[in-house]
Image (cartoon, rainbow, N blue to C red):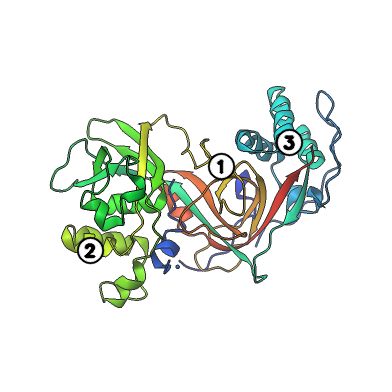
Amino acid sequence: MHVVAAPPALPFARSGAARLGALSLLLFAAACASTPPVAPPTRPAPGPGPITPPTAVEGLSLTALPGWAEEDHLAAFNAYVAGCVRARGGAAEAVCARGRDLAARRASPSDARAFLETHFVATEARTDDGRAGLLTAYFAPEYPARRAPDAEFDAPVLSRPANLSEVGDRAAIEAGSAQSTALAWMRAEDLFFLQIQGSGTLSFPDGARLRAAYAADNGKPFVGIARPMAERGLLPANGTSGDAIRGWLSAHRGAEARAVMALNPRYIFFVVSPDDGKEATGAAGVPLPARRSVAVDPSRWSYGEAVWIEADGGNLIGARASYRGLVMALDTGSAIRGPVRADLYIGRGDAAGQEAGAVRHPLRMWRLIPRG
């Protein structure tokens, strides 16, 4: 990573599971000139059909959120409509239904902005110590796979086991403790990274592609392997990137690599489906809008909630952009814990992966509360 000037702070307006942005943090963890402001336009009249007056809810007007005037309100509205189907609660479900009705009538940008400003207020989430939170990013990777094992592709992609509560840690599962079906076979190091990232696409020599998505885990804590690898002299202390770890595991494939990977007892099971070319599906069970969805701590947030994030790249080493806008809480991850912690889904492919790897930004988050 190197110091770069942050591009405009509205990445959602640009062109344009699986957690490579959080990957270095996950592997290391022990369990570790913007564009000038634009004056807000005069608020347009609502689009076709009346907007039902909302009930009173205390909170901050969305117009006071940092960057609200510069937001792509129609893109934000479309992401909301796509993700709010998982929202629960009287007001949340009522506002979602109104939004979907408006979307069916082909909302304009002004309609979208009026709807959001009318039906939501914002309250800022706070960390326990008052410090900034953390934004990382992830993407949907693609890995080669086989339908039968061989000397290189010897790690099974396992289905949710019938004896999930009894499977034990990674070493026990690899020894055969899980009553699971092998859905495909991968290189062991690729499976290890797929399990950290949570989802991805498997490609086969005959051209077939399957999407692998999180199905369950063994309930064990995540333990990063970068620190112990550095402590054992397997990698230099300043050279524990995801690429470096993958390279070492690949070069030491077999018992030696498996022993290192077993330092992380957490194990992820998958479900597979034909790859339809759409975005990855998150834990909420709906496709993730690229650059408009985040993985959150489900003990602090609910799936289907609308969230405003602000993460300034500033002079962060390696930062490519700042991130600000409305996103939907639709996923979770092993290291995503706390009230101001989010993992932004960038999209599919290598370019998304390269950008995701540069995201480790201080974060502020606002909960957008529906007024039913």
Label 2 residue SS: helix
* Residue shown at 58% from the left, 53% from the top: 299
Label 1 crowd bin: few (<14), some (14–19), many (20+), radius 10 Å:
few
Q: Position of residue 226 (x, y in %)?
A: 35, 68
Label 1 residue SS: loop
Image quarter of the C terminus: top right
Occupied quadrant, residue 75: top right
349 vs 190, left or right, is right
- What is the number of the mark on residue 90? 3
Label 2 crowd bin: few (<14), some (14–19), many (20+), radius 10 Å:
few
Label 3 residue SS: helix
The mark closer to the camera, 1 or 2, is 2
The mark closer to the camera, 3 or 2, is 3
Q: Given the image, on which type of amino acid does mark 2 rest?
A: Ala
Q: Position of residue 182 (x, y in %)?
A: 25, 39
* Residue shown at 43% from the left, 66% from the top: 31
Ranked by sequence position, the earlier of labels 1 and 3 is 1
